[in-house]
Amino acid sequence: MKSSAQHAPAQAYPRTGPSEEPVAAAVTEPSDVFAKAHQFTRLREVQAMGLYPYFVPVQASGSTEIIINGKRGVMVGSNNYLGFSHDPRVVAAAQEAIATYGTACTGSRFLNGNTELHERIEDRLAKLTGKEAALVFSTGFQTNLGVISALVGRDDTVYIDKLDHASVVDGCRLAAGDTVRFRHGDLDDLEAKLRQSNGGGKLIVVDGVFSMEGDIVDLPRLAELRARYDARLAVDDAHAIGVLGKTGAGTAEHFGLTDQVDLIIGTFSKSFASIGGFVAADQVVIDYLKHHARSLIFSASMPPSACAAVLASIEILEKEPERRLNLWANADRMKVGLKGLGFDIGGSETPIVPVVIGDDLLTFEFWRQLYDNGVFANAVVAPAVPPHASRIRTSYSATHTPDQLDFVLEVFARVGKGLGVI
């Protein structure tokens, strides 16, 4: 089928001349919903150049290494911040849960898919985050979808940072209220928009740690705005839980502002070596979400093995605070090393350390040469980051060794010089 864009618009009335036959109105062919797929040629072009960096099949993995096509490399592209994904205690807990509960709950938590493991996680997370209660979802993405869409009603407004995670953006799209975006990290811009509010409830939603920049939100200023404009504040701590705060409780603990953050949202797919998500808040809010968050009610629950992995990870986090110290030591080592080589690492303040390249194709070429030399990182281009801000996203773990990190710096230096980036 041809796209209707290839035709001139149909006219409202046929044109006629003195000696002309009436001209029939143009008939527009229906557009094919697959047209956009056929027009998406960039994928094939990048694949043909051998530079496609996505959906790479991993054959085997360890805490800090992977095997792809039979070749071993150092992984600096995962979010395995505390190195729990291959910890024998976490693995054993998951295996034991499978033996007890099977591989799946085969239903939503609302009906038949709720186990005592899910509720134990909620108790542990409420204690960890300093909130009255918590609620576990099947993924972190679904957590934001369910929480925002359930709480932001028709007369309400949700305010989000322009670089908030896609799950926050999509949660706002599902919400009945209005969405207002403010410039990244520009809380003067946020305040100006809060002043323009026409009433109704106000919810501010921000990432605690921004996943592509590695910077930490200015929570003290946000807390002031929350109080001044009678708003509620939600912090997505996907990349902060287990990482920030003296016990790993996240951004609110890091700043000592737990009582001024209304909703602490997180995921289990980073520090807790599993899959799933959660929100922690006042009991009355959690009770409401249990019965109104559609992504909870209408989704199958987390598998018991995933729940057990989370519980084991939380227990190790509490018993072994040195893991977080190792994580930060490794992150600081790489920030100093990459910046010292001449790379632009933006405003990173966390174990997420971007290497900003700028051009998309140069970023893909940089990724490929890292990959060929035994370093696996992530190539990130728009719309995941702003246009012309393409980058290699690196992130570090408590279990990376000094030799591995030195090797990564050596490869970055070689590739960066070869491509003229440094």
Image (spheres, grey):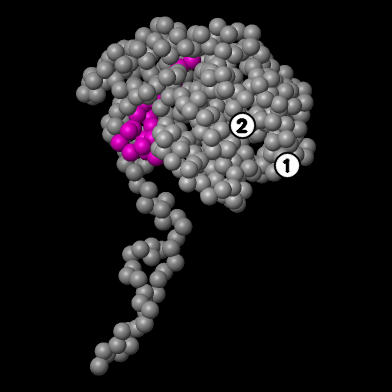
- Residue shown at the point (63%, 11%) measured from the top left: 318
172 in relation to 308, above or below? below
Regarding residue 411, the answer to whether it shows in the image is no
Mark 1 vs 2, N-terminal side: 2
Image coords of residue 246 (percent x, y): 56, 13
Q: Is residue 169 left or right of residue 95?
A: left
413 in relation to 231, above or below? above
* Magenta stretch in the rendered image: 376-397
Regarding residue 31, the answer to whether it shows in the image is yes
> Which residue was labeled with disc 2?
263
Residue 378 magenta-highlighted: yes
> Which residue was labeled with disc 1?
291
Report the disc number at residue 253.
none
Q: Amino acid at mark 1?
A: His
Q: Which residue is nearer to you in this view: 149 or 364? A: 149
Residue 59 magenta-highlighted: no
Q: Which residue is nearer to you in this view: 392 or 221? A: 221
- Residue shown at the point (72%, 18%) measured from the top left: 96
